[in-house]
Image (cartoon, rainbow, N blue to C red):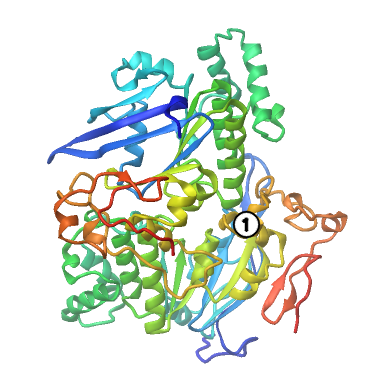
Amino acid sequence: MSTSQAVLRVDNLVAEIATPRGLLRVVDGVSFSVDAGRTLGIVGESGSGKSMTCLSLLNLLPAHARIAAGAVWFGGEDLTKKSPRAMRQLRGRRIGMIVQDPMNSLNPLYRIGTQIGEVFKYHHRVFSSRERWRRALAVMERVRIPAAASRIGNYPHQFSGGMRQRIAAAINIACQPELLIADEPTTALDVTIRLQILQLLRDIQSERNTALMLITHDLPLVARFCDEVAVMYAGRIVEQGPVEQVFGAPAHPYTRGLVDAMPRISRRSSRLVTIPGQPPAAGEYDIGCRFAPRCVHATDLCRSRYPELTAFADGTRQVACWYPRQESV
Amino acid sequence: MKRMEPIERMDPAALIEVRNLTKHYPIKRHWLARPVNLAALAGVSFSLEAGGTFGLVGESGSGKSTVAKIIIGAEQASSGEVEIGGHAFGARPSATAQAWRRRTLQPVLQDPYGSLNPHMKVGRIIDEPLRIQHALPSHEYRARVAQLLEKVGLSAAYADRLPHELSGGQRQRVAIARALALEPAILVLDEPVSALDVSVQAQVLNLLKDLQAESGLTYLLISHDLAVVAYMSTRIGVLYLGQFMELGSRDAVIEQPAHPYTQALLAASEPQSPAALSGVALEGEIPSPLDPPAGCPFHPRCPQAQARCIESKPLLRQIGADHWAACHFSATHLS
């Protein structure tokens, strides 16, 4: 991984939410980078801070949350220092986003063709509505929406979930972003449709050498689709590196627990291995390793000091554990 | 007519037996239009032995939840028969049969946020079935609730909490405790873990397996996740557009999948499987049940479809000891 071609570099990002009980650090010192043409998966369970990380990158944090520290480097600039207006210019044009169900991000009152066409109006200054319609049709065909010519005048509710996700992809193709952030893009879809959408994302990526970030709790998806993965737990990255190494021979006990907890068709077992207990509530952490209360290997050291993310012995990845597991099983 | 004693059945060991179940919903495309029939279920038959788990897999729109609703009694079948523990649930089930079903069969639903009353304490949620059914003298409720909570792996202190104070996994445990309150024989599990995180999902699946081993419960498990179904089930049925594409024992369906749809589902669910690596991704989406394709319902998406598949609809036929498939080209492996 050379940093010279990194499209996005996040340095020690800290995000806080104001609550009646005080400030909660939901993202606590997260660093990673995504290179052009590569795919980074961010996995974690609910409350791990993965979605807040992604919202921080885009300056889209809710009103009661803020970036407390850190930098987000994109195109030579620190995004955390940019004005809302400048960010609006950037989002959509250079950074694209795909969300879980685009039903919420598409306007139900406008025809699909109009909504895709807006991208050309605002980002490419195409002012002829006929020309915008023509270009919208072209991208709809590009994402293989069947009978696009007859469906371009339809409204969002007339499309299935998979088709709406294709439309979201079409909008992103129209923008031609350098970085595409997909937050749970396939969670609401059926398994056979998931593969289609992923294939589509991959096509978009290879066409323009886009850097892709995939935020999800779906481990098989990451295993199949990503080059690198960052595993988040309680606001921090606990393990980070190439997917084959991280999932093939997890060094952090949490990653290992996640991999083992997946029911697998090919592995016939009478019981699933589970991680005991619950993840901590967001922001409510002890001084030690945040996974220690659920970890079978935890010692006094784990409970008293947080292990920083350090290079692991195999040289490919970083692990935040005092006793990382060396060998694969 | 009341029928209390078990009647003659096809499979003497079966606790649940479903024959030729169909369900049509009349749909109006316009407010003035003549209603057309949407066939949510087009002839579904299966049986399940006591203590087993029947896994129903399918994509959205396949009709899997309709089967669950009919078995629970929340929907009436358009035709066909449902028999549970010797009680017939036809068009007009007897009051005795209905009362029996209410005590013997309990649902656990997908969304533990929506299925628990936010104003009721956990203890109250769990003892509600006891109060309604007058199953116990009221001074014993508290002890019974504690016992049930312990059974699902929560401490008795949870009885005084409200649902919003619990995590998703804990809520699903409460929902399971409520379902167990009347000591049912059958649980209908409709996507019981799909709203939960991976590590919590494994805990709940293990809990369900333990409870089954302990009390000999029979499960009807509905899920879109083939990995969950393969882990839990003894028998599996793969639904597509309201019909079984493949049906049989867990090992037959998972290890010798005979239908192209099952093979595609397996490939999509298991990224490391050889089929997935070959990159077989299904084209298209599940067709509208208002306008089902002629012939085999799967042919528009099937990589192996031929002219015959459009002309004639393959019927579910036996291809193994406990293995049926609805495909013209499935090889028989009867030993």
Q: Which of B52 and B188 is in front in this view?
A: B52
Q: Is residue B20 above or below residue A137?
A: below
Counting the numbered discs, the total is 1
- Residue A311, picture quadrant: top left
Q: Where is residue A97 in the image (x, y as percent from the top left)?
A: 46, 30
The foreground one among A82 and A151 is A82
In what quadrant of the picture does the N terminus of chain B appear? bottom right
Observer able to see residue B20: no
Q: Identity of the amino acid at label 1?
A: Ala
Q: Which residue is drawn at 55% across and 41% down?
A: A161
Q: Residue A196 at what x, y percent from top left? A: 62, 43
Look at the numbered disc 1 and give the secondary structure of its residue.
Answer: helix
Q: Which of A285 and A145 is in front in this view?
A: A285
In this view of the protein, which residue sits in the foreground, B325 or A48? Answer: A48
Residue at horizontal 64 percent and vertical 25 percent from the top: A139
- Whether residue B201 sits left or right of residue A94 in the image: it is left
In this image, B32 relative to B135: left or right? right
Image x and y of residue A301, in percent: 16, 56
Q: Quadrant of residue A141?
A: top right
Residue A63, image x and y in percent? 25, 28
- The quadrant of the image that shows the C terminus of chain B is bottom right
Q: Please indicate, yes or no, whether residue A285 appears anywhere in the rendered image.
A: yes
Q: Mark 1 points at which residue?
A: B267
What is the quadrant of residue A170 in the picture? top right
A231 over B318 or under it: above or below = above
Left/right of residue A20 with respect to residue A313 in the rendered view? left
Q: Which chain carries label 1?
A: B
Q: Is residue B221 left or right of residue B239?
A: left
